[in-house]
Amino acid sequence: MKKLTNKEKEIMDLYWQHGPMFVKELLEYYDEPRPHFNTLSTMVRILEKEGYLDHKQFGNTYQYYPLITEAEYGRKSIAGVIKNYFNNSYLSAVSAFVKEEKISVEELRELLDQIEKNQ
């Protein structure tokens, strides 16, 4: 799955927060100056083509809805970072967090406890 651009992520955040919407409804969540309707519509169709959104047809208009959750996107993004920057090694990624003091020994112990409970 392709990483979202900032604008695409902004649109997906609105769908994740508010659920299914027509582009006209989506536009209402933007502050002035709002993006042009056609621009927003094009971006929504791109997100649909990339597998992030799908639609239901109502007459000659479409209501779009997310195909993946925000949590699923987050997991796939983390997996991509680990693949691209840590040679697909989760151990290397966790080691980097430990070296940068982003995770404590206590948190590592909690993680080990969770792993042992799931086995």
Image (cartoon, rainbow, N blue to C red):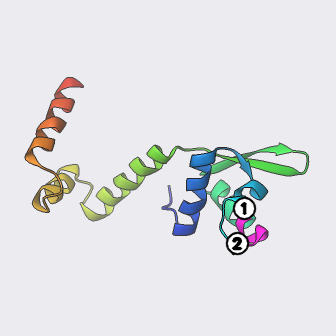
Give how far across and how far down residue 101 sits, in percent: 13, 58
Residue 35: assigned label:
2
Residue depicted at x 10% and y 60%: 99
**Residue 49 percent across, percent down from the top left:** 66, 57
Q: Where is residue 37 in the image (x, y as percent from the top left)?
A: 77, 67
Image coords of residue 72 (percent x, y): 46, 44
Residue 39 belongs to the span the image colors magenta: yes
Label 1, secondary structure: give it: helix
Q: Which residue sits at x=14%, y=62%?
A: 100
Horizontal arrangement in the rendering, residue 55 relative to residue 79 (left or right)? right
Q: Residue 117 carries which label?
A: none
Identify residue type, mark 1: Leu
State left or right for residue 9 relative to residue 39: left
Q: Outermost residue toward the right?
A: 59
Question: In screen coordinates, is 41 left or right of 68?
Answer: right
Residue 43 or residue 82, whichever sits in front:
43
Direction left: furthest residue: 105
Q: Which residue is drawn at 75% across and 72% down?
A: 36
Looking at the rendered structure, which numbered label has been put on residue 27? 1
Task: Answer yes or no: is residue 119 visible.
Answer: no
In the rendered image, the quadrant that contains the C terminus is top left
Question: Which quadrant of the figure has residue 13?
Answer: bottom right
Q: Residues within 10 Å of mark 1 (few under 14, many from 20)?
A: some
* Residue that extends furthest to the front in the rendered view of this protein: 32
Spatial distance from mark 1 to mark 2, Cα to Cα? Answer: 7 Å
Residue 48 lies in quadrant: bottom right
Q: Give the magenta range.
A: 32-40
Most foreground residue, 110 or 56: 110
